[in-house]
Amino acid sequence: MDPGFEAALRQFVIDRSSALFRTAYLLTGDRHAAEDLVQSALAKTAARWRGLRDAEAIEGYVRRTMYHEQVSRWRRRSRVVEVSTDERLDRAGDGHAEAADLRVTMRAALSRLTPRQRTMLVLRYFEDKSETEIARLLGVRVGSVRSQIYRSLERLKKSAPELSTVREFR
């Protein structure tokens, strides 16, 4: 393997793996599945590394690969998200009971959305992508993104009314 290529890839992973993991975790709801998703996306990116122009193109490719890979995983199998009671108690024990409850509620509510709806909300509110960026990433029209986000938020409000008082999803 070319030493320059290997060094550049290693540096990209060092610089961006935490941010990629956070996104993967929001998409999967599971730490191990998130790690697998990031690893899979990075492996696919490494295979195409030389064809990617700059750091922004590389990160965009990794993220788009993650989104598509996760949607494919959702389509292949029905998912049931279980939140460990121990995990919830550990968080509450830190003195952040309200925030922990909100995270658990948010995760459960997101798990009830369709894969496309969940992806749209994660991209818009957790990744802070514009509607135009989301449309480009997912290969759909901006109008489709707007309507999907609206429907997703409505469904989220119905499935978890307590989230309607939350001002920001970030």
Image: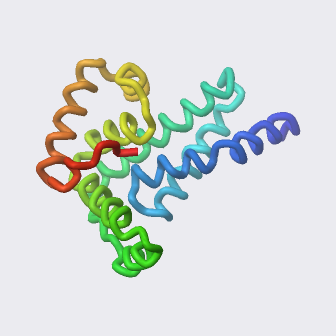
> Where 22 falls versus 81 (above or below)?
above
Residues 63 and 102: in front is 102
Residue in front for this viewpoint, 100 or 33: 100
The residue furthest right is 3
Using residue 6 as the reference point, say whether residue 152 is left or right of it.
left
Residue shown at the point (32%, 51%) measured from the top left: 74
Q: Residue at x 27, y 61 (%)?
A: 105
Horizontal and vertical percent position of residue 69: 43, 44
Quarter of the image with the N terminus is: top right
Q: Quadrant of residue 91?
A: bottom left
| Residue drawn where x is 24% and y is 25% of the image | 146
Up-down relation of residue 170 to residue 87 (above or below): above
Percent coordinates x, y for residue 144 in the rendering: 24, 23
Coloring applied to the structure:
rainbow
Which quadrant of the figure has residue 49? top right
Q: How many marks do you count on the picture?
A: 0
153 left or right of 91 in image: left
Q: Quadrant of the C terminus?
A: top left
Residue furthest out toward the left? 158
The residue drawn where x is 86% and y is 34% is 4
Residue 111 locus on image (x, y percent): 27, 56
Residue 167 pos. (x, y %)? 29, 43
